[in-house]
Image (cartoon, rainbow, N blue to C red):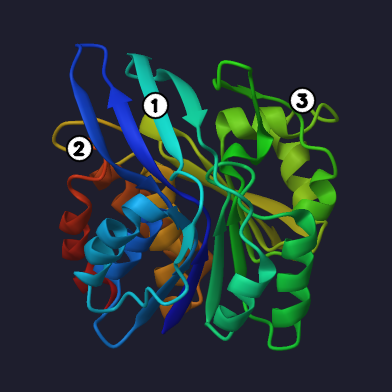
Amino acid sequence: MQITVVGHICFDIIKYPDGKENQSYGGIFYTVAALANLLGQDDVVIPVFGVGKSDYDEVISLLNKYGNVDTSAIYRMNGKTNQVTLTYQSDNCRVECSKNISEEIPIKKIRPTLSSDMIIINMISGFDISLETLDEIRIHVREENKPIYMDIHCLVCGVNPDFTRFYRPLEGWRRWLFMLHGVQMNEKEAKALTNEFSDENILASHILALNTNVLHITRGERGSTIYVNEHKNVKRYDFNPIKPEKAVDTTGCGDVYAAAYSVSYLKWKDIIKASSYANEVASFNAQFPGSSGINELSKFKSKLL
């Protein structure tokens, strides 16, 4: 099994309501590390992103600790590595501030990795790839019907002059979400995507009408929902939250969800079963601050057998 992951890495500074602070690599790192822990040593994860020259050696060393991550498509950038400050005002409310947003990942860096079994595109910054690049990826994998999974993440976010992020509708959202295997978003992102619909079920029906197979809505401590087409009818499945022993930080849980879904879908080819598994793994991840417990996800590998 081989999975390509496209999106920006970032250095996360997470500030909690109690005054504590955690610093670690985040963004696409969560997806890559989660995949590395859920896949076997004979499988391969191929991340594609740029990293600031001063951080390049550290990031490569960090990922090379996993024997199944191919770092050959990670490249040095002239600018600084993406930095994101997440300030939690409460357990469920945070302000995101993005500095040094990385340059767009060019198709020439992505194209050599598209022979993988699945392509995950995680719009960490919202500027990770262009719509034209996504179109080229779709064209490249279409004949072999390889699944593309996209987490829209900050694709629905603008940037204020003080670098804080804000939600706004996505221009051309239908073209972005056209002909994908799966689309993932949280509830706030779903509400921000377009002003055309106020009802989530109606939004889901329009997304699935774009020849996209499944819409995932993640709901934090309330679990997750998927929408799929069954016999030309939109069917909704809700997955109850699986409470970890102690919920500490939801940062990166959506990225872990995408990784867990992708691995399990390739294994079982069952959207509902894979979504349930993803909900469970992402819930478990919430008990660790930042990416500090990402390697604990390896305990879920046995459930894929």
Checking the image for residue 287, the label placed there is: 2
Image quarter where the C terminus lies is: bottom left
* Residue 141 drawn above or below residue 255: below
**Quick check: can you spot residue 304?**
yes
Residue ID at (53%, 55%) = 7
Q: Amino acid at mark 1?
A: Thr
Q: Amino acid at mark 3?
A: Ser
Marks 3 and 1 in Cβ contact (< 8 Å): no
- The location of residue 153, given as percent across then percent down, is 57, 41
Image quarter where the N terminus lies is: bottom left
Task: Please tell me whether mark 2 sits on a helix, a strand or a loop.
Answer: loop
- The location of residue 194, given as percent across then percent down, is 79, 32
- The residue labelled by disc 3 is 198
Query: Which is more toward the observer, 175 or 75?
Result: 75
Please tell me which of labels 3 and 1 falls first in the chain. Answer: 1
**Quick check: can you spot residue 250?**
no
Residue ID at (56%, 71%) = 119
Q: Amino acid at mark 2?
A: Gln
Task: Please tell me whether mark 3 sits on a helix, a strand or a loop.
Answer: loop
Task: Please tell me whether mark 1 sits on a helix, a strand or a loop.
Answer: strand
Image side of residue 198 versus residue 6, left or right? right
* Residue 200 drawn above or below residue 283: above
Q: Quadrant of residue 72?
A: bottom left
How far apart, in angstroms, are the residues tagged by discs 2 and 1?
20 Å
Query: Which is more toward the observer, 297 or 6?
Result: 6
Checking the image for residue 85, the label placed there is: 1
